[in-house]
Image: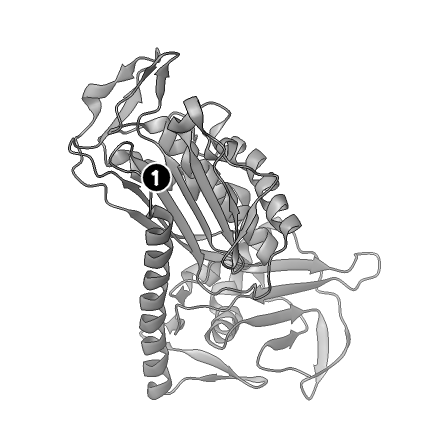
């Protein structure tokens, strides 16, 4: 039987008519009711599935066409639709499943000419919200945003606590799933696998040059913490200038704290604690975003609220340094920062590779731009 989170459809809408079809309304209704599945390729009688029917050819072009109206015909847009192709051409039983995630941005509205409405599932039917329902959903959205901000504040303050920011600047990066899906306890092997999977992903974003925090933590033996696993710092002694700490929480949250000020300049010389090389920021963000993506894959989370900041409590203003084409440090390009403004964004951690890579690039660029630096050196824009 159809239900509030399951909708049977026999055929896909015509590709060119998708924005004007019922598809945006069906997606918005599912999102407004906590998410669910829309299944194309099933006949139904009295809302009960009876047998399979073939939906015909379904290529990547049609898949992109399905995602487009979820963004352009729904307000706020619905990102991160998951689309699955089932069945075979030979058996003539091809089906398409559209998975709509729960959303904290409701109510999602549909505009038709000068009119708009907020659809919602009522058991097996799609109906339009009344004014009081819309009001309650807006109130829930604002409450959720406040709670999400409070969760990020708590993660950030915890990750920054105890760092010696009077000696060296530290980058603090935290990510919290907007709708945590993983409610169990992550075991040691899960944590090890996340750390293992994150390393090659980070290198695909920023390459092997630069100081990567993942190389300065114990990835094979994370320690248990309060509802989390902690990859502890291994950079001690003469390597203390690149120390780092990483936490992977059972709910899918991720935190990273690493020194970015006072890095090694030559074999026997170091930058000052307030001097941060842009490449160090890039490598840290590449590692952090790779950890977030690997954690999302493991826990089933999708949308994450992200915050990246640089903590510095010394007397001199913070400087972000870059290099010219010959590799020479170009300090004069930096704008002295008396305070680094944390950069916040929302990412779909399980979106297509190029899209997530683009988010990684933009996040790193926003960070170095604050110091007057225009270009990134390690993270290239996808397709450039």
Asked whether residue 376 is in view, the answer is no
Which quarter of the figure has residue 341?
A: top left
Q: Quadrant of the N terminus?
A: bottom right
Residue for point 38% across, 25% down: 377
Q: In which quarter of the image is the C terminus?
A: top left
x and y percentages locating residue 56 in the rendered image: 71, 60
Element at badge 1? strand
Residue for point 59% across, 84% down: 124
Residue for point 66% across, 49% down: 189
Among all residues in the image, which is located at the extreme front? 237
x and y percentages locating residue 85 in the rendered image: 69, 58
358 displayed left or right of 331? right
Residue for point 79% across, 56% down: 89
Residue matched to label 1: 171
x and y percentages locating residue 78 in the rendered image: 45, 63
Q: In this view, does 358 lie above or below 100?
A: above
Among all residues in the image, which is located at the extreme right? 91
Which quarter of the figure has residue 201?
A: top right
Total labels: the figure holds: 1
Report the front residue among 252 and 110. 252
Crowd band around label 1 with a 10 angstrom C-alpha radius: few (<14), some (14–19), many (20+): many
């Amino acid at each position: 039987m159809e239900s509030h989170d399951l909708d049977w459809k026999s055929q896909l809408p015509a590709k060119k008519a998708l924005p004007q079809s019922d598809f945006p309304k069906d997606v918005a209704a599912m999102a407004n009711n906590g998410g669910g599945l829309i299944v194309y390729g099933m006949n139904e009688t009295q809302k009960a599935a009876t047998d399979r029917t073939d939906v015909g050819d379904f290529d990547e072009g049609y898949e992109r066409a399905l995602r487009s109206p979820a963004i352009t015909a729904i307000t706020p847009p619905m990102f991160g639709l998951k689309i699955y192709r089932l069945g075979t051409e030979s058996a003539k039983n091809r089906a398409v499943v559209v998975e709509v995630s729960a959303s904290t941005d409701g109510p999602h509205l549909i505009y038709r000419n000068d009119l708009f409405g907020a659809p919602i599932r009522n058991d097996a039917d799609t109906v339009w919200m009344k004014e009081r329902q819309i009001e309650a959903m807006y109130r829930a959205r604002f409450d959720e945003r406040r709670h999400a901000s409070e969760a990020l504040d708590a993660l950030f303050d915890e990750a920054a606590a105890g760092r010696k920011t009077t000696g060296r600047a530290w980058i603090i990066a935290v990510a919290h799933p907007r709708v945590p899906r993983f409610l169990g306890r992550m075991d040691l092997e899960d944590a090890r696998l996340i750390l293992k999977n994150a390393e090659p992903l980070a290198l695909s974003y920023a390459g092997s040059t630069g100081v990567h925090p993942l190389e300065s933590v114990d990835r094979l033996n994370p320690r248990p913490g309060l509802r989390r696993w902690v990859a502890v710092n291994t950079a001690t002694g003469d390597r203390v200038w690149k120390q780092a700490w990483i936490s992977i929480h059972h709910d899918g949250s991720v935190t990273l704290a690493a020194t970015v000020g006072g890095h090694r300049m030559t074999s026997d010389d170091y930058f000052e604690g307030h001097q941060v090389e842009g490449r160090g920021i890039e490598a840290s963000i590449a590692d952090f975003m790779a950890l977030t993506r690997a954690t999302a894959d493991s826990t089933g989370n999708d949308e994450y609220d992200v915050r990246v900041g640089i903590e510095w409590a010394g007397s001199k203003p913070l400087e972000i340094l870059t290099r010219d084409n010959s590799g020479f440090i170009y300090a004069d390009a930096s704008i002295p920062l008396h305070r680094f403004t944390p950069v916040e964004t929302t990412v779909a951690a399980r979106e297509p590779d190029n899209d997530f890579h683009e988010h990684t690039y933009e996040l790193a660029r926003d960070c170095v731009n604050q110091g007057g630096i225009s270009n990134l050196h390690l993270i290239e824009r996808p397709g450039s």
